Image (cartoon, rainbow, N blue to C red):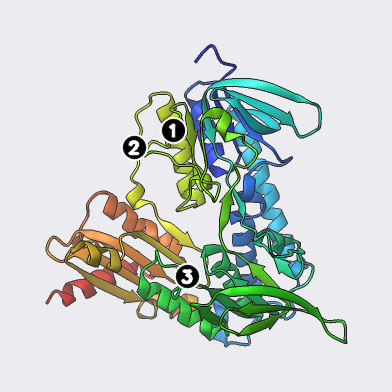
Amino acid sequence: MSNFEYDLLVIGSGPAGQRAAIQGAKLSKRVGIVERKSVLGGVCINTGTIPSKTLREAVLHLSGYRERGLYGASYSVKQRITMEDLHFRTQHVIQHELDVTRHQLMRNDVELLLAEATFVDANTVRLNYVDGHGYRDVTAGAIVIATGTSATKDAHISFDNRHILISDDILDLEHLPRTLTVVGAGVIGIEYACIFSTLGVRVTVIDKRRRLLPFVDSEVTDALAYHMRSSRVTLRLGEEVKGFEVVEDAQGNTRVHTHLTSGKHIVAESALHSIGRTGATGKLNLPAAGLTADDRGRITVNDRYQTDVPNIYAVGDVIGFPSLASTSMEQGRLAACHAFGVESRSKPSLFPYGIYTIPEISMVGRTEEELTNEGIPYEVGKAQYREIARGQIIGDTTGMLKLIFHMETRELLGVHIIGEGASELIHIGQAVMAFGGTLDYFVNTVFNYPTLAECYKTAAFDGINRLG
């Protein structure tokens, strides 16, 4: 690869691109990372994962949600919460993450190229500089596409960034709406529905599917739906949107009327349109490199994240599900290792999912539905947070941890959690599964007291009892 200007050129500076670039640099390769915006981090840091999770944390703190189990439903840290209150914490975290990202790239000698990239051929990329100072063609032995995604927009809808929104517009809101319609019950739509309902906003969620998050264990999603309805969220599942209409009444108040094909219509101050995301590949000129994308802009790869052109890799959200920052980072690392012939391993089947609804959800391994379809005999063990002293201490008496294990060998097959700290707690189960552990590990292990980790032991005993 010494005949090229770069050993590795990464297009996109989100989590997948960062990890690919740094891994390449750790292998003593000359690496360049291309970013078309004036800030690093991609959607993850600037408009997606970090802002939305910080917004959620600010909402949980200021609303007093975590303390309501102890002090009552009326408890709050701040009586009137404004968007300025939420922006303050969000901007602080974003700036810190941007600084950390830039420092990591600098100390690993990764060259930052602020430009928009388009392919000339499979080894040549044209960089159109964002400062307007012309362009430059660069060559690379290996190229990683990590351009991420953008919110999918229906061409028939007039988005105005105020009344009819996409998720990227949330951070630019000046005022909290009193009512909100969320179209699309995917991860992003459901997370924002929970955030706003916790603030007291009356939320209606509309989705064509008849259940929330179909890739998640049904018992967990049923529990989530119950909690959302308890927070006055209306779920209109199995419904399809026909169109939107922005109407101004005699008093000058603007409302969004969402019309459904069933004849219903929902009136709200704002509507969040969240029907998925489209791969940001439209300006890459993929055909010049011998590549194509599907109708949602996604690129197909093999299990080593290679595209149809062997020296070009694609990682992160641009390749589709699961589109999580954690999995994207691992994909970037593995792609860079493979590009330079370095042996590396990972277990995609044990990638954990964290969904930051309220309450949060996390899972690893297989669901009951998957095991049933595969004909694998299994049993479950459950622990309720209310059974655990720590659950009482933190005021979360509605959480649940469920273990799924093989009925004959007791091997742990899946862990599913809903409740406070789920995305942290899941890693205990993930570690046990990685080593082929059984239910007996939890029975024979002593956990700190009082902790939520005790749920594993309680659930293990419950599972053993079910075996008779």
Mark earlier in primary sequence (2, 1): 1
> In this rendering, does residue 459 appear at all?
yes
Instruction: Measure the alpha-carbon separation of dots 2 and 1.
Output: 22 Å
- x 17%, y 72%: residue: 464
Answer left or right for 38 relative to 24: right
Depicted 47 relative to depicted 236: above or below: above
Task: Judge depth for marks 3 and 2 and give the one in front.
Answer: 2
Instruction: Measure the alpha-carbon separation of dots 3 and 1.
Output: 43 Å
Q: In the image, residue 177 lies at what x, y percent?
A: 73, 76
Instruction: Measure the alpha-carbon separation of dots 3 and 2.
Output: 31 Å
Q: Give the camera-side residue of 461 and 280.
A: 280
Instruction: Name the residue beneath numbered marker 3.
Output: 420
- x 36%, y 39%: residue: 303
Checking the image for residue 308, the label placed there is: 1
Depicted 93 relative to depicted 373: above or below: above
Q: In the image, residue 105 lies at what x, y percent?
A: 61, 33
Please, what secondary structure does the residue beneath circle 3 have?
loop
Checking the image for residue 151, the label placed there is: none
Mark earlier in primary sequence (3, 2): 2
Answer left or right for 367 relative to 301: left
Q: In the image, residue 110 lies at what x, y percent?
A: 60, 27
Depicted 324 relative to depicted 40: above or below: below
- x 61%, y 45%: residue: 280
Mark earlier in primary sequence (3, 1): 1
Please, what secondary structure does the residue beneath circle 2 have?
loop
> What residue type is disc 2 on?
Arg
Q: In the image, residue 402 lies at what x, y percent?
A: 32, 70
> What residue type is disc 3 on?
Glu
> What residue type is disc 1 on?
Asp
Checking the image for residue 345, the label placed there is: 2
Please, what secondary structure does the residue beneath circle 1 have?
loop
